[in-house]
Image: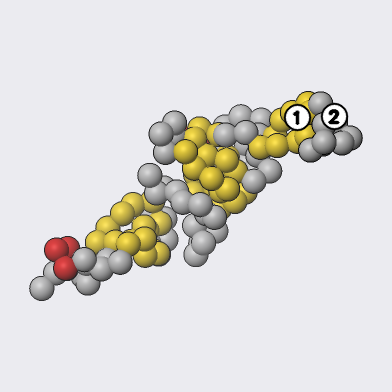
Amino acid sequence: MNIRVNDTVEVQVGDDRGVRGKVLSINFKTGKLIVEGVNRVYKHVRRSQRNPQGGRLSKEMPVQLSNVLLVCEACGKTTRTGVRYLDDGSKERWCKKCGKGDQIAPPKAAYAKQ
């Protein structure tokens, strides 16, 4: 899974198609993520000490991971990503459209090329 928290993604299907937002959280077990401003629903809240006024609370619901694409920071386009090891043994996620990459793991001696 090449999407991480604070990445910018674009929704590809559903009512919010074409909307870009920041990833707030990811649930790896269910394969879903919460994107800022996407898939908003109303939760009806009863009056209580915590919510003295009550009413409708608008919140984001999870989106299936397969329904979003990562937005490349370098080229600004939605893209698929790949993972590769650099010569020093560090792991990077790279854009398959422009080729730019960003490091996702520190260097390991086992993956370094002599």
Q: Amino acid at mark 1?
A: Tyr
Q: Nearer the viewer, residue 35 or 49?
A: 49
Query: Real-space Cα distance between discs 1 and 2?
Result: 15 Å
| Whether residue 86 can be seen here | no
- Quarter of the picture containing the C terminus is bottom left
Report the residue marked by disc 1.
42
Of labels 1 and 2, the one closer to you: 2
Q: Residue at x 62, y 49 (%)?
A: 21
Look at the picture and state if 34 lies above or below 5.
above
Labelled pair 1, 2 in contact (Cβ < 8 Å): no
> Depth check: 41 or 94 in front?
41
Marker count (numbered): 2
Is residue 42 depicted above or below 79 in this figure?
A: above
- Label 2 environment density (alpha carbons within 10 Å; few <14, some 14–19, many ≥20): few
The image quarter containing residue 15 is: top right
Q: Earlier in the sequence, mark 1 or mark 2?
A: 1
**Which residue is located at x 30 percent, y 66 percent?**
106
Question: Which color mode does the image show?
Answer: secondary structure
Query: At numbered mark 2, what does the secondary structure look like: helix, strand or loop?
Result: loop
Within 10 Å of disc 1 (Cα), the crowding (few <14, some 14-19, many 20+) is: few
The residue identified by callout 2 is 47
Q: Does residue 32 sit above or below 8 in this rendering?
A: above
Q: Position of residue 51 (x, y in %)?
A: 82, 36
Residue depicted at x 38% and y 54%: 96
